[in-house]
């Protein structure tokens, strides 16, 4: 142990010396080492890749090699990397007015809230930073609503139904709501009040409802679980059950909303409107963390001053970035682009004949290629050929490029996927 610590210290010292004298000469693998030595190992990033520049669907590593981004930071880059309109809006804001916290209003906040509420078709919104914060706010506000007259659940008894295989983020509340043992091991005790049912199983949902159920919180397509698309009719059935039992329908659209699946919201596929939308990722234009919960006054209006807050939520830079994203979304018709290009991508992928492929599924530009074996080696090989994708749930390659991808660029990507899967 002592020997290992000494070796690490020597390596660390060498790296620190180079960092202070020749930072620009650090290699991909030296950057990797810096992360290994000085950072907690929450992720397992693809080997030997350190990105320095990003533009549109492309990213470049520090050695100048170009890659296509097939992941888009899990849907954060719907508009493409460093979109001109979004960068311009942020440049105008930086150096002009920075964070004021919730204690004082700033000029960007009201317009942002009004535009986002209109975009979502809801009375009001509450902004947060990362996606999981918005999810957690939705949990809090659902409980609050459940204890009021409209529902009348006894204090401390509220139950929220969540789906097996869900992914809502990494705070302790979201980890408590998870059904994935690997996400939970070692982090207990967990928050009570969650009830699990199988995804895409209406009967199980119906059976789990009790007089204390205040909300059903779910992803209209489960992303992290492996791009699980429910059968047509499921979203409507959830809506009907929620209406019948006076329960809030809360859609986590953090990964699948804002155009990713070919619609403004993934719930639009069945023309279903939830009581609360939870959005994030792409809302910040891929540059800054912006998330939000959108709902009507009878729910969000219950929040009173002092009961919830966040220093950086709705800061001027976030507001400008998000307003710019909403503009780009409309002007460039990102949902339509996702629908058209998603269909094209799927068609092209269906021409690949490979014994490795079990199933190809998805909606819009959120595509999962399920393999018969671990996907990681295939992702490593795709990276070698210049296409960045990331495995999910072991054997699924998640493909989610920026929505501004062209047919020519899709052909470029499919050529590489074909090469790797048909080998
Ligand atoms: C459906 C869903 N909800 C919530 C989150 C958490 O978002 P964040 O990582 O911004 O906290 C994610 C992130 O991948 C997600 O996919």
Image (spheres, grey):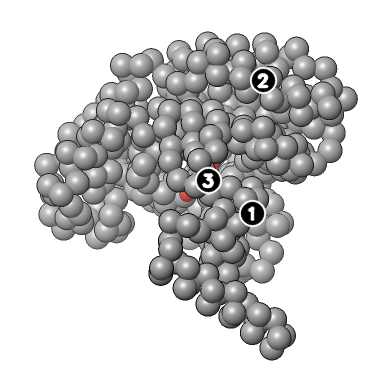
Q: Of marks 1 and 3, which one's residue comes earlier in the chain?
A: 1
Q: Is residue 110 left or right of residue 323?
A: left
Pointer 3 residue Cβ closer than 8 Å to ligand 1: no
Residue found 17% across the figure and 38% down from its top: 92
Question: What percent of the width, then of the height, locates residue 88?
Answer: 23, 33
Residue found 17% across the figure and 55% down from its top: 100
Question: What percent of the width, then of the height, locates residue 26?
Answer: 50, 58
Determine whether 220 is above or below 374 in the image. above
Q: Of marks 2 and 1, which one's residue comes earlier in the chain?
A: 1
> Which image quadrant is residue 56 in?
top left
Give the residue pinned by disc 2: 414
Q: Of marks 2 and 3, which one's residue comes earlier in the chain?
A: 3
Pointer 1 residue Cβ closer than 8 Å to ligand 1: no
Mark linked to residue 63: 3
- Mark 1: few/some/many CA within 10 Å (<14, 14-19, 20+): few
Give the residue pinned by disc 1: 44
Tell whether label 1 touches label 2 (CB within 8 Å). no
Nearest to the observer: residue 147 or residue 122: 122
Dot 2 falls on a residue whose secondary structure is helix
> Can you see residue 235?
no
Pointer 2 residue Cβ closer than 8 Å to ligand 1: no
Q: Is residue 396 left or right of residue 357?
A: left
């Amino acid at each position: 142990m002592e020997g290992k610590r000494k070796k690490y210290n020597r390596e660390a010292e060498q790296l620190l010396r180079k960092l202070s004298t020749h930072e620009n000469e650090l290699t991909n693998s030296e950057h990797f080492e810096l992360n290994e030595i000085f950072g907690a190992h929450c992720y397992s990033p693809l080997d030997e890749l350190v990105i320095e520049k990003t533009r549109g669907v492309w990213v470049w590593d520090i050695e100048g090699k170009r890659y296509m981004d097939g992941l888009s930071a899990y849907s954060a880059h719907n508009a493409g990397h460093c979109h001109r309109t979004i960068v311009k809006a942020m440049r105008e804001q930086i150096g002009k007015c920075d964070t004021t916290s919730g204690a004082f209003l700033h000029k960007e906040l009201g317009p942002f809230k009004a535009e986002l509420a209109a975009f979502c078709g809801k009375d009001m919104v509450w902004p947060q930073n990362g996606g999981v914060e918005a999810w957690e706010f939705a949990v809090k506000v659902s409980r609050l609503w459940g204890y009021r007259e409209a529902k009348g659940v006894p204090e401390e008894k509220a139950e929220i139904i969540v789906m097996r295989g869900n992914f809502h983020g990494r705070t302790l509340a979201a980890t408590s709501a998870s059904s994935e043992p690997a996400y939970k091991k070692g982090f207990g005790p967990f928050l009570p009040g969650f009830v699990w049912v199988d995804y895409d199983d209406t009967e199980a949902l119906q059976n789990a409802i009790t007089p204390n159920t205040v909300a059903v919180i779910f992803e209209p397509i489960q992303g992290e679980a492996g791009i699980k698309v429910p059968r047509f009719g499921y979203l409507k059935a959830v809506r009907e059950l929620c209406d019948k039992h006076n329960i809030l329908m809360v859609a986590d659209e953090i990964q699948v909303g804002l155009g990713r699946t070919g619609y403004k919201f993934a719930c639009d596929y069945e023309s279903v409107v939830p009581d609360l939308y939870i959005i994030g990722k792409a809302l910040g234009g891929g540059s800054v963390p912006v998330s939000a919960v959108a709902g009507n006054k009878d729910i969000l209006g219950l929040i009173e001053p002092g009961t919830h807050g966040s220093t950086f939520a709705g800061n001027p830079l976030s507001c400008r970035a998000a307003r710019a994203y909403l503009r780009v979304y409309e002007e460039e018709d990102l949902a339509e682009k996702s629908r058209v290009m998603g269909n094209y991508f799927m068609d092209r992928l269906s021409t690949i004949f490979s014994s490795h492929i079990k199933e190809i599924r998805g909606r819009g530009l959120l595509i999962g290629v399920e393999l018969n074996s671990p996907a990681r080696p295939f992702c490593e090989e795709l990276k070698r050929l210049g296409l960045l994708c990331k495995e999910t749930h072991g054997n699924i390659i998640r493909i989610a490029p920026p929505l501004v991808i062209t047919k020519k660029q899709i052909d470029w990507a499919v050529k590489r996927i074909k090469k790797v899967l048909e080998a």
